[in-house]
Amino acid sequence: MALKNRWLALISLIISVIVLGLDLTIMNVALPTMAADIGASTGQLQWIVDSYALVFAATMLPAGLLGDRFGRRKLLIAGLAIFMGGSILGALVSSPDGVIAARTIMGLGAALIMPLALSVIPTLFEGEEQTKAVAALTVGMSAGLPFGPLVSGWLLDNFYWGSVFVINIPLVAVGIVACLVLIPETRDPSSPRIDMVSTVLGILGLGALVYGLIEAPVEGWGDPVIVASMALGLLMLVGLVLRARRETRPMLDLELLKNPAFRWNVVIATLAMFVMMGLVFVLPLYLQAVLHYDAFDTGLRLLPLLIGMIVVARAVPPLTTRFGSRPVMVAGMGLLGIAMLLGSRTDADSGYGFAVLWMTITGLGVSFAMMPAMDNALAALPKGREGIGTGLLTTLRQVGGVLGVALLGSLLNAVFTDRIDTAGLPAQAAEAAEESVVAAQAVAARLGMSQLAESAEAAYIDGMGLVLLVCGIAALATAVLGIFVLPDDRKEKEPEDQTLVESHSGPADGA
């Protein structure tokens, strides 16, 4: 293939995966608007975010194997078409359940797009060019994450809420045309077979667990359906692990986690994703519903997270070269913990200035922890297992994000429902007010009860404070754990460096 066409194909693939990154976070700024316009409760808002990420995480591995067996270009185009179909549906529906259905379809498309976009790179590039192309695709996916809130804010201020779906359509169309024109068809018949039992166990197990976590604050943690859902989900996930351990070529290769270098770096990357996705869920509602910024201003005010990440991106390589990756990651998790504990001290009078401080530290901490963790985890993969190892790492990170929104969002919802004062309200109005802070403000405006709005905002701050406190304790505990379990890569490099010195200096004196 001509050099120009190869790079055009790569640019088109990058545009496609940028959309995937955007859609992991683009909805968060839209949540308050959707709560007001289509009456979504806090639980439904969690599902709007998590339905996409859950299906994305649970079907990514079998989706990649489908491409290996039946044609990567064919399945990549199918993934893009499914993603576009979900986006069109999302732009047309007018109910929370419709949006959740649209996001679920988009998650299925995303699960096909990401692994197959990576798998076609070797058909276009070789050697150093291939390394650069993979890096560019990965950066494209990551770049979409922090820009999602900003793009969403601009769209919501200028168009209706469904525009956050419409923006996907032309970008995905470019990807489809590029695949048809520029990318050759390839297969790998020797790839592991698609284990439908493992696929079903993974999807249903994760789905049942997340359902229980999200619905528990509404139905009650002791509700038989909730208890059964979470127990069944855990049992199916345990079954998935046991099945993977018996298979000779498992779809989910958990043997890779026996390597401490891979295992503990995956833990760090997954926990950082857990905190980050949970934080990006609770922050937009705080900025819009409590501090009363509009959608675009909310996107702008989330930029300290991005600025912290950009600063660290340039600082991490020289720091890890000089000090090793372990102290850098431990410091990153420590910074993240400190930032979360600072954020947990937010009260009704804190204002945006205080949020800037701890959001910036959060961005620094997440990047100091996650960037070296990702690099080290990938470097620890044995030859010939890079593809399935990358899939496992990406899947576990996405699962961390799904559980972050489910668990932390439910914790927030439980505190909010408990703390909001609905005394004296008619039963129907009280029930509506307990659905979300935005719903409570709408009820307060309709009834002329400013004290209800103040109570809702205070309850939301209390819930967010507890969420951040939990995140802070988890991050600090992980930092302490990292001191003992993360390998010291400086010790691994020293023998190599010594060997290089000896090979260049010749025989020792007296030889």
Image (cartoon, rainbow, N blue to C red):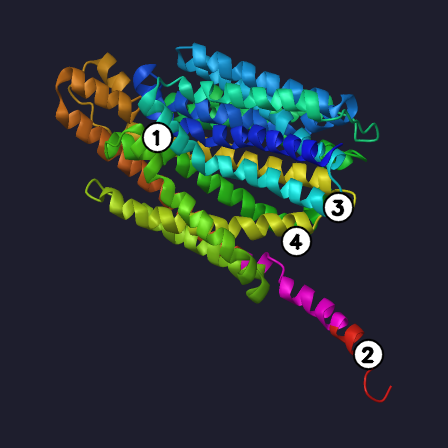
Mark 1, residue position = 414
Give the residues drawn in magenta, as a range.
Answer: 482-500
Residue at horizontal 62 percent and vertical 30 percent from the top: 13
Tag 1 or tag 4, which sits nearer the N-term? 4
In this rendering, the answer to whether 125 lies above or below 377 is above
In this rendering, the answer to whether 296 lies above or below 484 is above
Q: Is residue 62 left or right of residue 214?
A: right
User: x, y percentage for residue 388?
Assistant: 72, 37
Q: Nearer the viewer, mark 4 or mark 2?
A: 2
- The amino acid type found where label 1 is placed reads Ala
Q: Which mark is residue 261?
A: 4
- The amino acid type found where label 3 is placed reads Gly
- The amino acid type found where label 4 is placed reads Ala
**From this viewpoint, is residue 344 visible?**
no
Tag 3 or tag 2, which sits nearer the N-term? 3
Q: Is residue 153 left or right of residue 106?
A: left
- The amino acid type found where label 2 is placed reads Gly
Mark 3, residue position = 127
**From this viewpoint, is residue 226 visible?**
yes
